[in-house]
Image: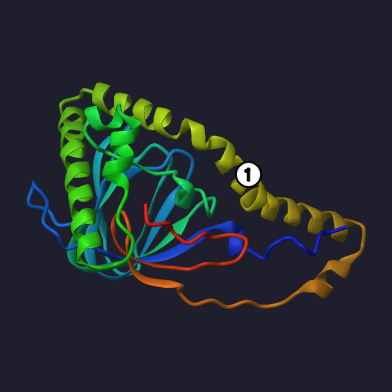
Amino acid sequence: MVNPALPNPLPGAVGLSHLSAYDWEAADGVCGGSPHLHLVCTEAYVVTGGRGAVQTLGADGYREIPLEPGSLAWFTPGTVHRMVQGGDLRVTVLMQNSGLPEAGDAVFTFPPEVLADPDRYRAAATLPPGTGPDTAEAARRRRDLAVEGYLVLREALAAGDTGPYRAFQSAAARLVRDKVPAWRALWQEGALAAARRTGAHLDALVEGDPAYLDDSTAHSATPTRHGGFGMCGRRDEYGVPGTTLPYGED
């Protein structure tokens, strides 16, 4: 029997948000967001307006993928990504395992000495509450520190040296290790529960019992916060019950 109490997530239990890329110029003369990676989530950008690019660092080296209206780019766990502005860039973000990034599945490319100290990392990554000028200034400092570490990683990869990139991945894994039990619970209650529900529906159809269709319904939502300071830009968020958790102030 299908459990009607299970939440009704977005398709695939994905997370959904909208981003307007930062137009702050960084040390390398490029305007854009804070480079970071996710440890267990794949992320996708669907471009809805403007122009820009996403710069990535991975086992395949450095790449710059152009972004323009209608284009789609996605990157798997462990891929460092940096959204860069080319002119009024706006994207819709689809995030695997909705709720996990909001619970900390993202590590900035801060310099090694910051990554090595959990308290120092937390202080550098945390923003003050709200969307005012103090928060904007802190978000820009955070971005600049992430770019500082990112440029070192990129230069090393360009020279064929994967050591700093591998060291960053290891440092990121150490930083999040204690969060994994909470992530597992969110995954079990969200994405895994959604997949199991599909399995239960398939079993019911095989048995010739479509009674679960009586629970069919429709849902709608509007953003619960506009203009939050995300990692890559100003972020409009959805608080969809049972799936997406609105980003905390960190």
Q: How many marks?
A: 1
Q: Please give the name of the residue rendered at 42% of the width and 65% of the height, measured from the top-left corner.
A: 17
Q: Please give the name of the residue rendered at 20% of the width and 24% of the height, measured from the top-left corner.
A: 160
Q: Which residue is mark 1?
A: 185
Residue 170 to residue 80: above or below: above
> Is 216 in front, or is 183?
183
Give the colour scheme shown: rainbow
Q: Quadrant of the N terminus?
A: bottom right
The answer to whether residue 65 is left or right of residue 14 is: left
> Is 10 in front, or is 247?
247
Determine which quarter of the picture holds residue 148. top left
In the image, residue 42 lies at what x, y percent?
A: 46, 47
Q: Is residue 70 visible?
A: yes
Q: Please give the name of the residue rendered at 16% of the width and 63% of the height, measured from the top-left corner.
A: 23
Q: Is residue 80 visible?
A: no
In the image, residue 32 lies at what x, y percent?
A: 20, 56
Residue 177 to residue 3: above or below: above
> Is 202 in front, or is 247?
247
> Is 33 in front, or is 141?
141
* Secondary structure type for disc 1: helix
Residue 179 to residue 100: above or below: above
Identity of the amino acid at label 1? Ala
Determine which quarter of the picture holds residue 117. top left
The answer to whether residue 74 is left or right of residue 62 is: right
In the image, residue 90 lies at what x, y percent?
A: 29, 68
Determine which quarter of the picture holds residue 87. bottom left
Q: Please give the name of the residue rendered at 60% of the width and 66% of the height, measured from the top-left corner.
A: 241
In the image, residue 70 lies at what x, y percent?
A: 35, 68
Mark 1: few, some, or many residues within 10 Å (few <14, many ≥20)?
few
The answer to whether residue 198 is left or right of residue 132 is: right
